[in-house]
Image (spheres, grey):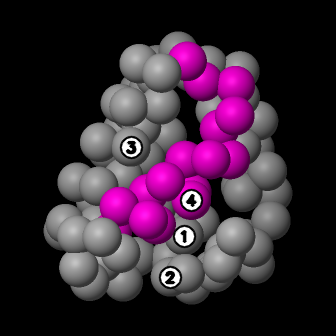
Amino acid sequence: MTDRERSARVSRLSGFFWGLDRRQRRRLQETMAALLETDETIPDRDLILQSIERTWRQTRPPIAGRVEAFYRERPEVADRPGAYGV
């Protein structure tokens, strides 16, 4: 995966967190990018859930909690890398 592809994937997936302020979104994007550096084959769903957990270990912004609940309740959604071609 090239840097450009990694950046595009991070931007696309962090877009689901529309209620975050710029600082919160940047933290989330940095976490996503670090996870992709380790494993670029991680499914989108797992990348999102792990990023939430690692970015906000205790108190999460409300939108992060809603996104997390959505993916935890629907394990079949985004179950592969690049599942969202938005």
User: Which circle's residue, 4 or 2, is located before the other in the chain?
Assistant: 4
Q: Name the residue under label 3.
A: 29
Q: Distance between the residues labelled 4 and 3?
A: 10 Å
Q: Name the residue under label 4.
A: 12
User: Which circle's residue, 1 or 3, is located before the other in the chain?
Assistant: 3
Q: Along the horizontal axis of the image, is 52 left or right of 86?
A: left
User: Which circle's residue, 1 or 2, is located before the other in the chain?
Assistant: 1
Q: In which quarter of the image is the N terminus?
A: bottom left
Q: Along the horizontal axis of the image, is 20 left or right of 65?
A: left
Q: Name the residue under label 2.
A: 81
Residue farthest to the front? 4
* Label 1 vs label 4, nearer the camera: 4
**Residue 63 visible, this angle:** yes
Q: Which amino acid does label 4 sit on?
A: Arg
Q: What residue type is labelled 3?
A: Gln
User: Which circle's residue, 1 or 4, is located before the other in the chain?
Assistant: 4
Q: What residue type is labelled 2?
A: Pro
